[in-house]
Every structure is written in structure tokens, then in C-alpha cells.
Amino acid sequence: MGMNPAAMFKIKGAWEKFAANHPKFPLFLNAAARSGIKEGYILELKITSDEGNTICTNVKLTESDMELIQTLKEIGGAKR
């Protein structure tokens, strides 16, 4: 199943705006990619509210997660 080209452009545009608003995040992703994100690695995400409340979760990357990461790299125009 292929992605609608219009949807791809919308996602790419949204990413470019996000990256412009948060320039440290793409730098972080590039550093992570250079060090090599691999199946079995654990990603952790923490959200902190204005009031200081936090929630945190993590995921252990699977083979299908790696396929998604590769697809996102391709959409974003990143080098393999």
C-alpha cells in the first residue's frame, strides 16, 4: 500500500516547520542516526507539563519499527 503523494508532501511540510521551530531536535536525530539506531535499542519519551507533571514511556525497537524509521528517513530526504 503506497502513501498518497499529497499526504507525503503535507507530512514533509509539517516536519520542515517543526524542525525550524525546534532546531535542536533534528540535530539530536542526526546524532542518533550517526551512532546507529538498531533493533533492540530502547527509545524513551518524557513529557513535562507547564505545571511540572511528567509522564514517561519507552519502547524497545523491533524489525517493523526499523522499517518505519527507514520510511521516515526517506520521506524526510535523509541520507541512508
Image (cartoon, rainbow, N blue to C red):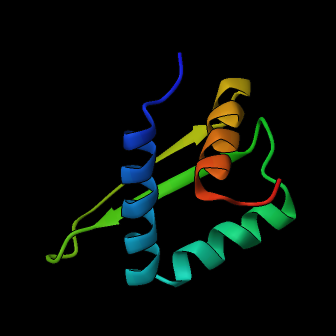
Say which residue appears at 70% left-offset and 42% top-offset.
70
Q: Is residue 66 above or below residue 1?
A: below
Q: Is residue 73 left or right of residue 17?
A: right
Camera-side residue of 11 and 53:
11
Q: Is residue 3 left or right of residue 34?
A: left
Spot the residue most to the left.
Answer: 51
> Could you tell me residue 65's position as x and y percent?
64, 32
> Could you tell me residue 16's position as x and y percent?
45, 70
Say which residue appears at 85% left-offset and 64% top-offset.
35
Camera-side residue of 42 and 67:
67
Q: Is residue 66 above or below residue 37?
A: above
Say which residue appears at 64% left-offset and 74% top-offset.
28
Q: Is residue 46 left or right of residue 1?
A: left
Q: Is residue 1 above or below residue 62?
A: above
Say which residue appears at 65% left-offset and 67% top-offset.
29
> Could you tell me residue 75's position as x and y percent?
59, 49
> Could you tell me residue 59's position as x and y percent?
56, 39
Q: Is residue 37 left or right of residue 7?
A: right
